[in-house]
Image: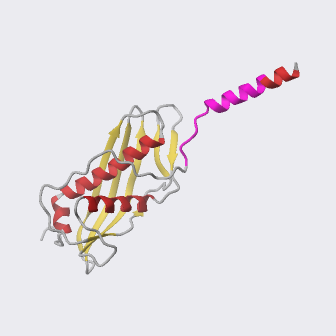
């Protein structure tokens, strides 16, 4: 009798534990884009560019998303450096676009502060990335200063890390696409200040 009670008690504990959702907390940031980089319409003659390590200017540096399908939102957090992650992959995308990047002594340096890096999940995954950028020449003169942003949306299974990775990566790709298509940024990348 005692064995039967004990066995059913253990079974009920196991069932409760298995039904509990494992929260996506402190997950690593993984680069997994599905979007294609869109290049600017004009051919730029650009000397090498340095992309400085970006800073993370968000209030809650751990938060990168949340699932709001239920009354109680489920968080998505990371312990990784979001600023470093974004600048590393923006550099890769610049190289992919044919704009050579170097560690230092470039004609143009791009500094950035990540203002938004977040996914809201309801029926779909919706991400937004926004970066405050400053492009300077070798003498430190500001060539362009402003906000660059990108969004992405996708369907996927509920509350899955892979979908968060994809939609955040796509938003970074779309941010670089918007940068490369903006006339003012194109001009600054050639070493000329906006409005000259």
Overall secondary structure of the magenta section: helix
Residue 57 visible to the viewer: no
Q: Which residues are magenta?
A: 8-25
Q: On the rendered structure, is 95 left or right of 191?
A: right
Q: Identify which residue is drawn at 38% across, 53% down.
A: 116
Image quarter of residue 9: top right
Q: Which one is nearer the viewer's eye here, 153 or 163? A: 163
- Looking at the image, is 108 positioned above or below residue 58? below
Quarter of the rendering occupied by the C terminus = bottom left
Residue found at x 47% / y 60%: 81
Res. 44 visible in picture = yes
Q: Quadrant of residue 135?
A: bottom left
Q: Is residue 2 magenta?
A: no
> Whole-percent x and y of residue 175?
29, 53
Q: Residue 61: x, y in percent?
A: 48, 56
Q: How many marks?
A: 0
Give residue 195's position: percent from left, percent from top.
13, 68
Q: Position of residue 63 (x, y in %)?
A: 48, 50
Q: Using residue 179 as the reference point, say whether residue 91 is left or right of it.
A: right
- State the quadrant of the N terminus: top right
What residue is drawn where x is 12% and y is 61%? Answer: 43
Q: Residue at x 20, y 67 (%)?
A: 189
Asked if residue 13 lies in the magenta stretch, the reply is yes
């Amino acid at each position: 009798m005692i064995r039967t009670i004990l066995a059913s008690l253990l079974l009920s504990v196991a069932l409760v534990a298995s039904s509990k959702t494992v929260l996506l907390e402190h997950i690593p940031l993984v680069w997994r884009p599905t979007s294609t980089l869109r290049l600017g319409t004009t051919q730029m003659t650009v000397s090498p560019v340095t992309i400085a390590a970006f800073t993370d200017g968000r209030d809650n540096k751990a938060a990168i998303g949340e699932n709001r399908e239920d009354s109680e939102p489920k968080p998505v957090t990371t312990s990784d450096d979001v600023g470093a992650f974004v600048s590393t992959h923006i550099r890769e995308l610049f190289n992919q676009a044919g704009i050579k990047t170097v560690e230092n002594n470039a004609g143009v340096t791009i500094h950035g502060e990540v203002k938004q890096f977040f996914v809201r999940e309801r029926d779909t995954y919706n991400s937004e990335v926004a970066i405050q950028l400053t492009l300077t020449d070798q003498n430190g003169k500001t060539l362009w200063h402003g906000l660059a942003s990108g969004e992405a949306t996708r369907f996927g299974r509920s509350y899955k890390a892979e979908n968060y990775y994809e939609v955040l990566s796509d938003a970074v790709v779309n941010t670089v696409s918007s940068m490369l298509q903006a006339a003012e940024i194109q001009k600054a990348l050639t070493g000329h200040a906006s409005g000259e």
